[in-house]
Amino acid sequence: MADFETVVVETDLLICGGGMAACGAAVEASYWAKKHGLKVTMVDKAALDRSGAVAMGLSAINQYVDLNSGNNTLKDYCDYVRNDLMGITREDLVASIARHVDNTVHTFEKWGLPIWKDEEGNYVHEGRWQLMINGESYKVIVAEAAKNALAEAGGEYFERVFITHPLMDGNKCVGAIGFSVRENKLYIFKSKATMGAMGGAVHVFKPRSTGEGFGRSWYPPFNSGASAFFTLYAGAEMTCQEVRFIPVRFKDAYGPVGAWFLLFKSVATNAYGGNYMQENAYELDKWEPYGKVKPRPANIRNWLMMLDVADGKGPIYMQTADAIQRIAEGAEDERAAKKMLKELEAEAWEDFLDMTISQAILWAATNVEPEKKPSEIMACDPYFIGSHSGASGAWVSGPEDLQTPETKDEYFWGYTGMTTVDGLFAAGDASGASSHKFSSGSFTEGRIAAKSAINFILDHNEAPVMDDAQVESLKAEILKPLDTFQEFKGATTDPEVNPNYIRPKQFMYRLQKIMDEYAGGVSSQFTTNDKLLEKGLELLAMLKEDQANIAANDLHELMRGWEAVHRMYQAEAHVRSILFREETRWPGYYFRADKPSMDNENWLAFCNCKYDRNTGEWEMIKRPVKYITQ
Amino acid sequence: MPSYVIPDKCDGCKALDKTACQYICPNDLMVLNKDLMKAYNQDPQMCWECYSCVKICPNQAIEVRGYQDFVPMGASVTAMRSSEDIMWTVQFRDREIRPKRFKFPIRRGVSEGQAQPFDHWPTGDEDIKSETLMGEPAGLNTERGPVKFDKVPTL
């Protein structure tokens, strides 16, 4: 076995991850841990200042419920989320986040995040729930507060330590194991409660760009399914694993469209000027009642656009020039119009520069001045992200006080944010069925779950029991790719081509090809059927066997190897869940050609699943959808 | 390609305790060639073009060249980040189009390192079993009082 030092870290609460949810957890947990004399430890695979989905920055805060205004209620937010997800949502979780999120946003402002204000000092809304920010340093600021919170409470954080597996004592999570990507060290964290907040998954499906632009995914390529694997391997029940998210963005560089649609009131058309939202409206009847709600669900908007693409009416354009012209026409005189245009231009570019700089490069490289000509938009690739208009993640307990007599038995088991595994909590993209939490809501969910985890520790303040055999076996398994490479590298003259092993990159490519062609990826216009899915599972099973032969020549590649394995488990959960749900509910995300309609009678339900790490068996579970607002 | 390093400007961060770009890259792509004492991007295909390395480099030695499988050549977007704002310069492929320059704030009212995590508002209920989070309920309210959504200008 490769020569590694083993470092053991003992803590009360372990937070795995470093993004928005993990930082929210670190701040809130530190606040309560300080009062109760407990220790909080955070572990991030990258550097806290620029890790997670907000690493590059953001141009908007997409969840601000503004309850204080009196215009919006928790029910309004639940209605919005439930409709956008075609009826499949845990309203108790959505409401739980929504009732706290304004406090989070106000706190961000206290930490120095510049939120746009109008002349009267009020926040500038991008849309009903969205605020505009100068968000280049959003993550830097939030990370700074998290570090300061940990320091004040006597906690600690580790950077560049990649968590691979949870450590288990029966159905209780007692910590996590991983390795440093900088030095030959294995880390064993022993904890009384553990939070999984390691983001969603990208590169499970083959992306549209397969050359240099492979990494230009909409969601970051370093979100590699760690959360899904962590909770699955622990034996936690998972939910909404079929609910992938495919955003429509500016073509190729995937720059945001929110400001254009919401703030600038722009419309999108096909190449012949037709407005597909109007011209294809006949299709909405088929997806009632959700097809007719406003705003239209994200997948339905995708679907109406995809119909035009399939009809040969592309390219699809965001009519940026028209939108800017219309706004400028509202100005009092020519001078005011000129000033307004200049401001709009800066806002349009900042929207990209704050969060998708590649789109600014692409516009500059193709000589796009948005006030002069329209720009192409396009559906991206499928992503797993529980925080946006996707829903995949672990099945977690909601808060007791938000349950009704009908929901309590189904949705509450003691500790808010806890999975079905004792002591294992999840937040952000790691927790499912609570969509539309975005950055601010993910941070908030981390806070809620962290306070609950501290409560769990106080109720169960016992030293974690470690199974040494389990730890030793995992150590060997984690390092095996390094050993495999050393053992066989001399068998051929080129380390890339060797019959004894598979390198992580090829492993990922194989996974992506399977998913693309069998599970409804880009190349099949997101369409699949039961037979394709079954065939996909057959190929996934062989890929899983070949996991034993992954080879890595250094720590970086060892991380890539485990990232690929994590992605594979996310993929299998996805394929099994699409197969289990015998209907098409989210056209625009995926289409099951053998079950082309929505079946509310049988499938207005959660499709949950569990993985047994000892037997390799999957269990599919149908759970009722019960609303708290109706 | 994403990020690339200009050899004449990169000094391998020899005066610092760690290589800045290697420290910050969220995808573990920037590495230091210790023989040359120059950094490089070890896997450009996995680069998100997040500019974290560009922004942190003390010598402005890192720039980004657009992904060549879909970006025509000749344009550039450069960033200069200070502790309070960021300055962007956008150079078009067509040199007839005047380059654009933007400056945006990145922080307001709190200097770097000074974000105080706790106690911006009193916490109304200190019971660990309550649903009250730090700073609630006072921190849920805006200091300016109720705002009507339809009165908020969209621009």
Image (cartoon, rainbow, N blue to C red):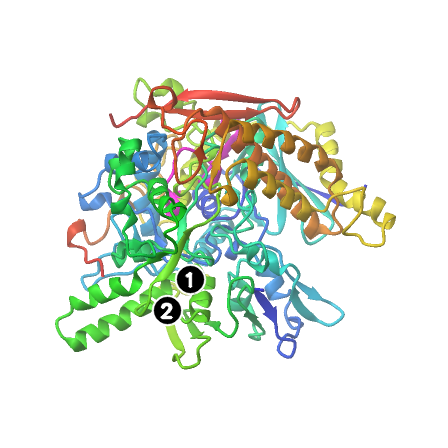
Q: Nearer the viewer, residue A34 or B141?
A: B141
Q: Magenta segment, which residues?
A: A418-441
Are the residues flagged by discs 2 and 1 in contact, CB closer than 8 Å?
Answer: yes
Under mark 2, the amino acid is Phe
Instruction: Kindly identify which residue carries mark 2.
Output: B104
Q: What residue do we see at 59% from left, 43% from top?
A: A512
Q: Residue furthest right?
A: A490
Q: What residue do we see at 50% from left, 50% from top?
A: A52
Instruction: Find residue A521 and name its label.
Output: none
Q: How many marks?
A: 2
State the SS at label 2: strand
Under mark 1, the amino acid is Glu
Residue B82: where, in percent of width, then height?
45, 71
Q: Please report, as a chain letter, where disc 1 is located.
A: A
Looking at the rendered image, the quarter that the C terminus of chain A falls into is: top left
* Above or below: residue A322 compared with residue A462: below
Residue B57, quarter of the rendered image: bottom right
In this view of the protein, can residue A291 be seen by the observer?
yes
Asked whether A453 falls inside the magenta stretch, the response is no
Q: Nearer the viewer, residue A183 or A620?
A: A620
Residue A400: where, in percent of width, then height?
35, 25
Q: Please report, as a chain letter, where disc 2 is located.
A: B
Instruction: Kindly identify which residue carries mark 1.
Output: A136
Q: What residue do we see at 31% from left, 32% from top?
A: A287
Looking at the rendered image, the quarter that the N terminus of chain A falls into is: top right
